[in-house]
Image: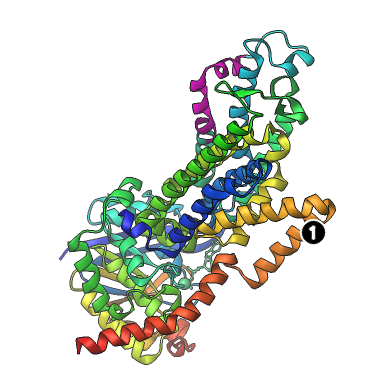
C-alpha cells in the first residue's frame, strides 16, 4: 500500500478569515478516512481544495505520488481518478436514473462522442451492476426528482462508482438518512473501499465508529488529532471541543 | 436514430401534423395570409433555437433578437444590392455617401449569403467564450445578453449611412431575379420557410435525442455535478449558444424577403423577450412547444392587433404571467398532463396483461 493523497501545510483564507490554517495529512490507499469536527471546522473547504474548487493560498496537494493537483481544472479530476459527492445531493433531477448513469459512465466526453458514440454493451453492463449494488435497478426509468432523499444520495454515489475512480470524496453522505439507510450506506462504503480510497466528511459519530479505518479531527481550520477511532475518542482535547459538546449526538 | 423511432414520439408526430397542415394551407388561405404565416414560420424557427438554449440547457438569453437581426440584415443587404443593380443603394445616397462601404462590397455576390450563419456564429462564439469560460451564468448572463441587444440597436440606428438607421433596410425588389411582389415568389418563400423549419427541427431533434441532449439537461439541473463528472460545461454551452445563434440567423434571413423590411426594432430587448415568451407559452424543453408557441402567439397577435392594437402588450404580459404561475410547462406540458391521465390506466392494464402472460 502506498500513499494516495498527501496534503502539506494547506492554508485557505476567505477575506482574511482562515478557513484552513495549515492542514497536513496523508491518506493511504484503500483507507476509509473520516474527517470529523464541529460545523465550520473547514471540512468542506478541505474537500473543495482537493477537488480544485478553491485555490489554496499556500501548501500543496499531491495525488498518487507525483501529481500536484492544486492547479487542475475541476473537470479533469475525473480523468486522473478523483470523484466528489456534494453535501447536498446533486443528481440530474430531470433525467431518469439510467440517464444519470449514462452521462456519467462515458470516458470520451467530447461533443462528437456524445452525438455519435452510443453507450457500449460493456458500459451498459457496468451501469446495471452498479445500480444493482445501490439497489436502484428497479428505478432505472424513474426520474431522479422522484427518488427519496436516500436514493438520491445513492444515485450520486453510483454515478461516481461507474467512473473507475481511485479516490472518492464524500461530503456528509448519510446526512438526513434514517438508521437503516445509514447502515446500508456504510456497507456500500465498505464494498467501495475494496477497489478505491474513500474520504468521508461526517457528523454522525456512530457511523464513524462503525466504518472508519482512520479519523482526522478538525477544529477551526486545524487538525486536532488523527488516528484510530478509539484513540481520538480518548483525546481530552477532542472530547473538549467536539465530543463533549454534544457533537456525538449530532445525528 | 432511425426514421422509425422519429415518428414514435408524440412530439415528432405533432410536428409532422403541423408541417402537413402548413403544406396544405395555401389551399385554404389567401396569399396575404400565407405570407403572414410564412413570417410566423420564421419565428417558429427562431423559437426552436431559443428552446435549445433555454429550455434544454437553462441559459436564458434575452438578446436573441441580435442574432435574428444579423441574419436578417445579411439577407437584407444582399437583396438591397440586388435591387440597386450595381449602383449605390438608395438610402446611402440620401445620407450623402458616394462610394459603397467596404462591408457592403461582398453582398453583390450570392456567396455572401453564407454570412447569414457565419456572422451570428462568430459573435455567439466570442460572447460565449468570454462569458461561459469565466462562469458567468444565470441572471448575469441574461443581463449581459440584454446589453448586447441594446448595443446593437444603438449601433444600427447610429450608423444610418451604413445600416439605414431607424428605418432599416427596405425597398427590396427581387431575389435571385424573382420579383418579390408576385404571388408566385411569395409561395416559393413560404415553402422555403417550411423547408428550413423542418431542417432546423431535425437538427435540434438530432441533438437532443442523443446523449448530448441529456448532457444539456444535466447542465441545466446541476452544472457543478456535470463538471465533476468530467465534462467542461463551457464547451457545451458555447456549442449550444452558437447553434441557436445560427438558427436565429437563418430565421432572420427567411423573415426578410417575406416581410420586406428589417429594422433595428426587430433586434431590440422587447422583441427578444417576446421570443422567450413564445417558448414559455408553448412549453419549453420540448422543441414542439416552441413551434406551437411561436405560431400561436403570433397568430393571436396579428388577430388581436388588427382589431385592438393597444391591448396586445397587456394581453401578452397577462398570458405570460398566467402561464408561469399555472402551467410552468406551457401548453405542451398541459396536454401531456391530461394525456397521461387518460392513457396511464390503459398502459397499466397493458403492462399487467404482459406480466400475467409471462407468468
Ligand atoms: N466561500 C466562502 N466564503 C467565506 N467563508 C467561507 C466560504 N466557505 C466556507 N467559509 C467559512 O469557512 C469555515 C469553514 O467552512 P466549511 O469548510 O464549510 O466547514 P464544515 O464543512 O467543516 O462545516 C466556516 O467558518 C465558513 O463560514
Ligand atoms: Mg460542510
- Please give the residue where the numbered disc 1 appears in the rendered image: B314
Badge count? 1
Q: Is residue B94 above or below residue B330?
A: above
Callout 1 secondary element: helix
Left/right of residue A132 with respect to residue B10 in the rendered view: left
**Quadrant location of the N terminus of chain B in the rendered image:** bottom left
Q: Is residue A41 visible?
A: yes
- Say above or below: B85 vs A98: above
In this picture, residue B315 sits left or right of residue B47 = right
Mark 1 surroundings: few (<14), some (14-19) or many (≥20) residues within 10 A:
few
Judge whether residue A51 can be spotted in this image: no
In x, y percent, where is residue B106? Answer: 55, 17
Q: In this view, does A118 lie to the left or right of B110?
A: left
Where residue B26 sits in the image (x, y, percent)? 58, 45
Q: What residue is drawn where x is 68% and y is 39%?
A: B267
Judging depth in this view, the residue of A157 and B37 nearest the camera is B37
Residues A172 and B274: in front is: B274
Magenta stretch: dominant SS?
A: helix
Q: Is residue B113 above or below residue A238?
A: above
The chain ID associated with circle 1 is: B
The front one of A194 and B88 is B88
Q: Is residue B109 magenta?
A: yes
Q: Give the range drawn in magenta.
A: B102-120
Residue A53 part of the magenta segment: no
Q: Which of B129 and B259 is in front in this view?
A: B259
Quadrant in which residue A249 is drawn: bottom left
The residue at label 1 has a CB less than 8 Å from ligand 1: no
Which residue is found at the position 51% from the left and 21% from the top?
B110
Amino acid at each position: 500500500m502506498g500513499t494516495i493523497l498527501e496534503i502539506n501545510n494547506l492554508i485557505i483564507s476567505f477575506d482574511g478569515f482562515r478557513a484552513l490554517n495549515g492542514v497536513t495529512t496523508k491518506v493511504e490507499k484503500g483507507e476509509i478516512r473520516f474527517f470529523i469536527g464541529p460545523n465550520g471546522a473547514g471540512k468542506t473547504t478541505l474537500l473543495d481544495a482537493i477537488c480544485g474548487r478553491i485555490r489554496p493560498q499556500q501548501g500543496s496537494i499531491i495525488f498518487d505520488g507525483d501529481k500536484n493537483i492544486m492547479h487542475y481544472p475541476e473537470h479533469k479530476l475525473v480523468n486522473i481518478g478523483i470523484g466528489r459527492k456534494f453535501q447536498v445531493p446533486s443528481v440530474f433531477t430531470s433525467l431518469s436514473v439510467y440517464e444519470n448513469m449514462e452521462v456519467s459512465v462515458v470516458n470520451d466526453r467530447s461533443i462528437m462522442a456524445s452525438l455519435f458514440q452510443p453507450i457500449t454493451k460493456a458500459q451498459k453492463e457496468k451501469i446495471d451492476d452498479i445500480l444493482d449494488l445501490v439497489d436502484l435497478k428497479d428505478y432505472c426509468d424513474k426520474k431522479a426528482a422522484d427518488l427519496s432523499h436516500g436514493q438520491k444520495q445513492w444515485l450520486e454515489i453510483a454515478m461516481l462508482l461507474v467512473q473507475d475512480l481511485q479516490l472518492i470524496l464524500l461530503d456528509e453522505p448519510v446526512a438526513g438518512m434514517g438508521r437503516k439507510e445509514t447502515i446500508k450506506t456504510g456497507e456500500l462504503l465498505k464494498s467501495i473501499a475494496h477497489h478505491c480510497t474513500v474520504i468521508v466528511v461526517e457528523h454522525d459519530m456512530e457511523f464513524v465508529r462503525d466504518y472508519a479505518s482512520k479519523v482526522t479531527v478538525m477544529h477551526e481550520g486545524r487538525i486536532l488529532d488523527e488516528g484510530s477511532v478509539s484513540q481520538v475518542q480518548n483525546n481530552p482535547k477532542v472530547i473538549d471541543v467536539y465530543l463533549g459538546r454534544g457533537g456525538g449526538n449530532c445525528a | 436514430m432511425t426514421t422509425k423511432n422519429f415518428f414514435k414520439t408524440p412530439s415528432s408526430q405533432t410536428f409532422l401534423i403541423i408541417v402537413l397542415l402548413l403544406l396544405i394551407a395555401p389551399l385554404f388561405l389567401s396569399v396575404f395570409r400565407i405570407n403572414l404565416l410564412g413570417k410566423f414560420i420564421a419565428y417558429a424557427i427562431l423559437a426552436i433555437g431559443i428552446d435549445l438554449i433555454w429550455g434544454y440547457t437553462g441559459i436564458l438569453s434575452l438578446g436573441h433578437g441580435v442574432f435574428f437581426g444579423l441574419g436578417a440584415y445579411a439577407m437584407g443587404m444582399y437583396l438591397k444590392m440586388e435591387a440597386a443593380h450595381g449602383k449605390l443603394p438608395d438610402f446611402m445616397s440620401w445620407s450623402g455617401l458616394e462610394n459603397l462601404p467596404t462591408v457592403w462590397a461582398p453582398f453583390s455576390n450570392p456567396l455572401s449569403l453564407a454570412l447569414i450563419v457565419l456572422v451570428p456564429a462568430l459573435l455567439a462564439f466570442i460572447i460565449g467564450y468570454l462569458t461561459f469560460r469565466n462562469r458567468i451564468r444565470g441572471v448575469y448572463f441574461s443581463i449581459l445578453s440584454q446589453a448586447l441587444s441594446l448595443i446593437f440597436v444603438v449601433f444600427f440606428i447610429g450608423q444610418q449611412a451604413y445600416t439605414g438607421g431607424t428605418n432599416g433596410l427596405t425597398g427590396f425588389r427581387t431575389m435571385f431575379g424573382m420579383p418579390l411582389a408576385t404571388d408566385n415568389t411569395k409561395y416559393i418563400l413560404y415553402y422555403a420557410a417550411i423547408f428550413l423549419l423542418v431542417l432546423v427541427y431535425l437538427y435540434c431533434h438530432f441533438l437532443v435525442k442523443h446523449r448530448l441532449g441529456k448532457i444539456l439537461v444535466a447542465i441545466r439541473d446541476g452544472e457543478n455535478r456535470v463538471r465533476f463528472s468530467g465534462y467542461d460545461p463551457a464547451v457545451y454551452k458555447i456549442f449550444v449558444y452558437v447553434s441557436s445563434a445560427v438558427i436565429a440567423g437563418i430565421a432572420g434571413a427567411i423573415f426578410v424577403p417575406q416581410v420586406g423590411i428589417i429594422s433595428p426594432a426587430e433586434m431590440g430587448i422587447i422583441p427578444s423577450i417576446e421570443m422567450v415568451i413564445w417558448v414559455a407559452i408553448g412549453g419549453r424543453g420540448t422543441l414542439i412547444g416552441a413551434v406551437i408557441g411561436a405560431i400561436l402567439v403570433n397568430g393571436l397577435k396579428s388577430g388581436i392587433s388588427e382589431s385592438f392594437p393597444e391591448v396586445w402588450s397587456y394581453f401578452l404580459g397577462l398570458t405570460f404571467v398566467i402561464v408561469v404561475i399555472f402551467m410552468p410547462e406551457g401548453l405542451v406540458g398541459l396536454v401531456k398532463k391530461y394525456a397521461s391521465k387518460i392513457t396511464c390506466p390503459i398502459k397499466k392494464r397493458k403492462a399487467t396483461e404482459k406480466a400475467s402472460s409471462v407468468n
